[in-house]
Amino acid sequence: MSKPLLTLLASACAMAIPTMAHSRPVSLTVQLKNYGGDGAYLAAYLTDAKGAYVRTLWVAGGKAKYHKHLSEWSRISSGDAKRLDGITGASVGAGRTLKVSADLANAMIDAGFEIRIDAAAEDMRDSPMEVRVPLSTANIGKPQAGKQYIQSVAFQLP
């Protein structure tokens, strides 16, 4: 290997290691109610202490034409060109469970950040901010109830 390539590789590794050390995986479990309709579209996203959009964690439901029904997420994330990069999957059927994971910075824990989930199902009422879960150590593993489609949401920080 040439010296410039080795230098570049060493620099990249040196910059990546502190970032990895300051983040941790969060796993999110969303249990849907048996609401009697088609599969739900869900958008799980992160907001800061002021309620401003930070990033999308997962979108369940691949047809972009229906994402407008996830209205709060759609509205506040519209400027994020990468909001769907690699974080979409199929819609979630009534009574089913969605499990997703993402890496979050340690500094977000107990700092006023929230995991929010918007929900919608075909021919049924949309439910913006169906559930809001403060990202705090006090809420780890504690199920939070949703309003219409979601039975509960819980997150774990291994």
Image: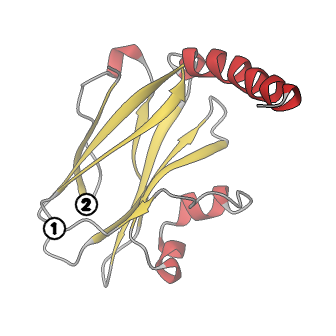
Residue nearest the observer in this picture, 157 or 68? 157
User: Please, what is the three-letter code of the amino acid marked with disc 1?
Assistant: Tyr
- Say which quadrant the N terminus sits in: top right
Residue that badge 2 annotates: 149
Is residue 35 depicted above or below 55 in this figure?
Answer: below
Residue lying furthest front in this view? 1
Callout 2 secondary element: loop
Q: How is the image coloured?
A: secondary structure
Q: Residue at x 16, y 66 (%)?
A: 94
Q: How far separated are the C-alphas under marks 1 and 2?
A: 6 Å
Q: As displayed, is residue 81 above or below residue 52?
A: below
Residue 22: percent from left, percent from top: 58, 16
Q: Tell me which residue sits at (56%, 59%) in the image.
A: 72
Q: Is there CB contact under 8 Å for labels 1 and 2?
A: yes
Above or below, comparing residue 154 to residue 88 in the picture: above
Q: Position of residue 155 (x, y in %)?
A: 32, 31
Toward the viewer: 44 or 124? 44
* Identity of the residue drawn at 11% across and 63% down: 34
The single residue placed furthest to the right in the displayed view is 4
Mark carried by residue 35: 1
Q: Earlier in the sequence, mark 1 or mark 2?
A: 1
Task: Give the position of the C terminus as an image quadrant.
Answer: top left
Give the x, y percent position of residue 48: 62, 33
Question: In the rendered image, which quarter is residue 85 located in?
Answer: bottom right
Residue 4 falls in which quadrant of the image? Answer: top right
Residue that appears at 66% across and 24% down: 16
Relative image position of residue 63 (x, y in whole percent): 45, 79
Task: Give the quadrant of residue 153.
Answer: top left
- 10 Å neighbourhood of mark 2: few (<14), some, or many (≥20)? many
Dot 1: what SS? loop
Label drawn at residue 20 = none
